[in-house]
Image (cartoon, rainbow, N blue to C red):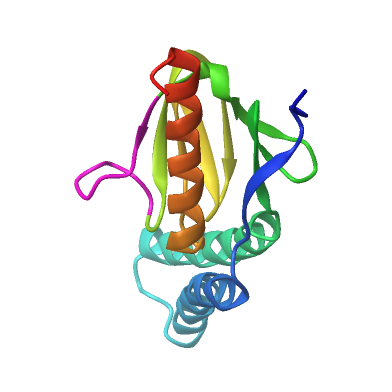
Amino acid sequence: MTDPDEVLQRITPSLPRRVMATGGLAALGLLLLWVTANQPPADMGFLVFNLVIGAGSLWLSVALWRATGVTLELTRETLRERDGRVLTSIDNIARVDRGFFAFKPAAGFRLSLKVPMPGAYAPGLWWRRRRMVMVGGVTARPQTKAVADLISIRLAQKRGEL
């Protein structure tokens, strides 16, 4: 008997990618705030715009750092975060797209779902919107490719093609 919670493959965001992504966002936020503080624009709308985008970039860099500290795990039954938060079950996946022209994140893949799920977002790692789950961003291409391939194999097994 096979264990449904057996981890088949993991996606662990690499530290250099996390640092580059969060550093870029933080640098943008700091630069906007610094320019706005040193040479405030005459137009009040542009001033508010710079402050909001600068503060938002800093907030998003912190959110991205926290979200990418998580490892994704593929089990026989689910794709989940290590702490147990489920992205989707294998039974709910209709198709895996990771082709060159597929709408997907960098170094990642897209899952089309059979049944819509509530939206969720882990910046830089994965997000879910109705019938779509996207995985990628600060992930390593070999790990995401392996997970996408294993999901495709699991789907073929469930359909009786293998």
Q: Position of residue 61 (x, y in %)?
A: 59, 65
Q: Report if residue 48 is visible in the image.
A: no
Left or right, 73 with reference to 42: right
Residue in the picture at 34% in, 66% down: 43
Residue in the picture at 55% in, 17% down: 91
Left or right, 24 with reference to 84: left
Q: Which image quadrant: the N terminus?
A: top right
Is residue 23 magenta-colored? Answer: no
Q: Which image quadrant: the C terminus?
A: top left
Residue in the picture at 51% in, 45% down: 147
**Viewer-closest of 77 and 20:** 77
Which residue of the protein is positioned furthest toward the bottom in this rendering?
38
**Viewer-closest of 1 and 79:** 1
Residue in the picture at 51% in, 32% down: 128
Q: Position of residue 2 (x, y in %)?
A: 74, 27
**Viewer-closest of 147 and 128:** 147
In the rendered structure, which segment of residues is drawn in magenta?
95-105
Q: Main secondary structure of the magenta part?
A: loop
> Compared with residue 56, is residue 5 higher up or lower down, i.e. above or below?
above
Q: Report if residue 101 is visible in the image.
A: yes
